[in-house]
Image: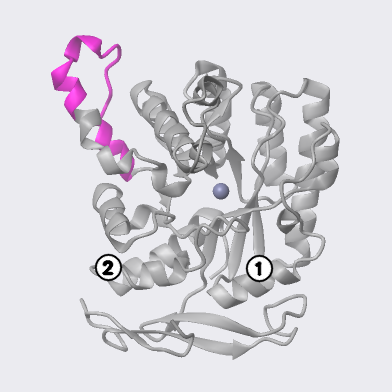
Amino acid sequence: MSDHTPILFPDDGPRATPGLVFVACAAEGGGGGGGAATQGRRREVVVSGRRVRTVDIHAHCAVPAANALVGRTIETDALLMADTRTRLRAMDEQGIDVEALSINPFWYPAERDVAEQVIRVQNEKLAEICATQPDRFVAFATVALQHPDLAVTQLEEGIKKYGLRGVSTGGSVNGLELADPKFHPFWAKAEQLGVLVFIHPQGTAELERTGRLAGNGLLTNTIGNPLETTIALSHLIFEGTLDRFPGLKICAAHGGGYLPSYAARSDAVQTTFPKRMTGTLKKRPTEYLRQLYFDSIVFTPEALRHLAAEAGSGQIVMGTDYPFPWTSTSVDHILGTPGFSDADKIAMLGGTAQALLKIPG
Ligand SMILES: [Zn+2]
């Protein structure tokens, strides 16, 4: 689709420009909101005559100095933030105003003192990046969850000292589920601070060891990642973590993996095998999906429609997975999915994320 092409959608309520959803372009020459000069044009997303500040909840980056502390190299230079011109160009082309940066955890095996350094270096750098271009970047704090008491301190410091807007985690920690009681202090602190926890999977290491995900298709990632998210969320529900910390704000990557697409089975097991329920939940398992947030990386209009049917459109936040090119059309995916009101689209494109991440309107 050209940036200049108006897109028409069925109207579903009174508004200033009924049914018309369009995108416009603005020249971006280093002034305005662009920070560092970016070549090309910046796509501005407009819905019902209203400019929408779009937010990408799922954007990766890396801090090489932190990786070096544990002898790791960076997966791809596209993760680096030393020169953000390429990243900003992609954001401008895709109509992404703000990226919420996160770093996938590689430090979970690290001993306490090293983990402490890794997180300090990372969170300081993330704060610095965001301060340089505050209109384009916010970031999730990193924490050393393998040392839960340390993670609690790092979370509080990340939010209060460094001004980060939430916290990111993996889908498990050295083989332990996020629902493990060991992590209750972390969840308690996240709930107390009212910050968003972004859960990003790192595959299913246990299956990788068996070789079942080997072969063609990068199954370790293709299905291993969403599978880990499915397992993590299921335990958070069934082990009662979400009952224990009802105020938690959690966003799961990749549309929550497979859980929302087969959610009703989690209700059905309660009546099919009642004796296998080792704890009592306050709600039906599927009801918890309506308090979780999910990114929009589900690829098709039908998948997005279904996710909204299970979780509510107000629980969906746009994601891109930048710099990994799973998609470059996240804005159009939301704009082009039938059945959403303009208010729904505005919420998914950025409104909900803005509120969660305390990004000014
Ligand atoms: Zn990702």
| Left-right relation of 60 to 190 | right
For residue 298, what is the image quadrant? Answer: bottom left
Q: Quadrant of the N terminus?
A: bottom left
Q: Residues within 10 Å of mark 2 (few under 14, many from 20)?
A: many
The residue lying toward the viewer, choosing from 76 and 134, is 76
Q: Position of residue 286 (x, y in %)?
A: 25, 36
Q: Is mark 2 within 8 Å of ligand 1?
A: no
The residue lying toward the viewer, choosing from 314 and 28, is 28
Do the numbered discs 1 and 2 sit on residues whose CB atoms are within 8 Å? Answer: no
Q: Which residue reaches farthest left?
A: 271
Q: Which span of residues is magenta-colored?
A: 268-290
Q: Which residue reaches farthest front?
A: 215
Residue 159 sits above or below residue 112 on the image: below
| Left-right relation of 130 to 10 | right
| Label at residue 136 | 1
Give the spatial CA distance, label 1 vs label 2.
Answer: 27 Å
* Chief secondary structure of the magenta portion: helix
Q: Position of residue 35 (x, y in %)?
A: 74, 75
Residue at x 52%, y 32% (from the top left corner): 214
* Lower sequence index among marks 1 and 2: 1
Residue at x 85%, y 34% (from the top left corner): 69
| Residue behind mark 2 | 340
